[in-house]
Image (tube, rainbow, N blue to C red):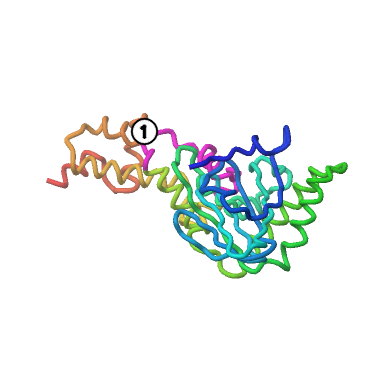
Amino acid sequence: MYRYFLKDFSREGEKVMIERSVWIEGCLPLHGHDFLEIFYIEKGKGFHILNNTRTPVCEGDLIFLSYHSVHTLEAVTEDFTWINLSFYPEFIDKSLINEFNSNEIIRLSVFKSMFEDNTVADSSIMVKDAKDEFALIFRQMEDEYREKKYGYVQILKYDLLIVLTKIFRDMKDGGLPGEFGNSSIISSVIEELENNLSGDLDLNAIARKAYMSPKYFSRFFKQSVGVTFMEFVHKQRINRACELLEKTDMSVSDIMQSVGYSDGKSFYRLFKKYKGVTPGSYRKNLK
């Protein structure tokens, strides 16, 4: 399988590339890439193949791909043409993203590969029949990129933000699919937590992996789960401690450390808070 790197195609020092592509037989093998990609079908009809799934696409359709998506395009008509917008997320100025729009923008980018040690994130977003909303702006971005007039990089950043916001608005109005909505992010966060209960679960680090500010992530997590981030962590750790008390002969001290606590006083206090008894009494009551 081919893997494309943006640095091999973009102009030196740039974190974005815009190009028009016309279908040529054999020109686009099944591939992955190290960048985010939005492509807008400008003319013709074809198929987008993503992980062996063939989806019909035609003029006016827009597809947004994550880092590790393995995909290709296949023409049905000879005039099959699309405009590629390839970029690294850091191309978007942080000053353009605030606590009110960051979640919407980042979750759009299918930053489903939100945890760095994940293997493959094969998700994509498609907006059908988007000609009225996107045709002009993609052509304008293509012109700005090609002509390189004064201020073109800043214009491209603002235009990209407009594209992302329009995608979000269209999908929100039509009902954001579950796999790209809150459930996806929260599921990934919970999976990360459950796999690392014995580690240092720092809110700032988890928020950073989710591409959110700590303040926004805290509010987002509580709205989605119903409890604060740390309350959820403590509950999960105490539940894991109960499992170990029930199923193993490990000492209370070893169990405490295995679920991420180094201070016995805090562990006993939290255990009693959530279970009503001390760890020793909990195990004794099982007999």
The answer to whether residue 171 is seen in the rendering is no
> Of 48 and 35, which appears nearest the observer?
48
Q: Is residue 231 above or below residue 62?
A: above
Membership of 185 in magenta stretch: no
**Horizontal and vertical percent position of residue 200:** 43, 33
Q: Residue at x 58, y 64 (%)?
A: 76
The answer to which of 106 and 52 lies nearer the viewer is 52
Question: Which span of residues is magenta-colored?
Answer: 195-219
> Does 181 sit left or right of 272 as displayed?
right
Q: What x and y, as percent, mark residue 182?
A: 51, 57
Q: Label 1 neighbourhood size at 10 Å, few (<14), some (14-19), many (20+)?
A: many
Q: Identify the image quadrant of residue 244.
A: top left
User: Observer-nearest residue: 204 or 280?
Assistant: 204
Q: Foreground residue, 118 or 52?
A: 52
Residue most extreme to the left: 287
Q: Secondary structure at mark 1?
A: loop
Q: Is residue 9 rendered to the left or right of residue 75?
A: right
Residue 26 place in picture, x, y as percent: 56, 50
Q: Considering only vertical position in the picture, is 11 above or below 219?
A: above
Residue 35, position in %: x, y? 60, 42
The C terminus - image quarter: top left
Can the viewer see residue 90? yes
Horizontal side of residue 28 vs 122, given as left or right: right
Q: Amino acid at mark 1?
A: Tyr
Q: At 52% from the left edge and 63% from the top edge, which residue is drawn? A: 55
Q: Is residue 211 left or right of residue 238?
A: right
Q: Label 1: which residue?
A: 261
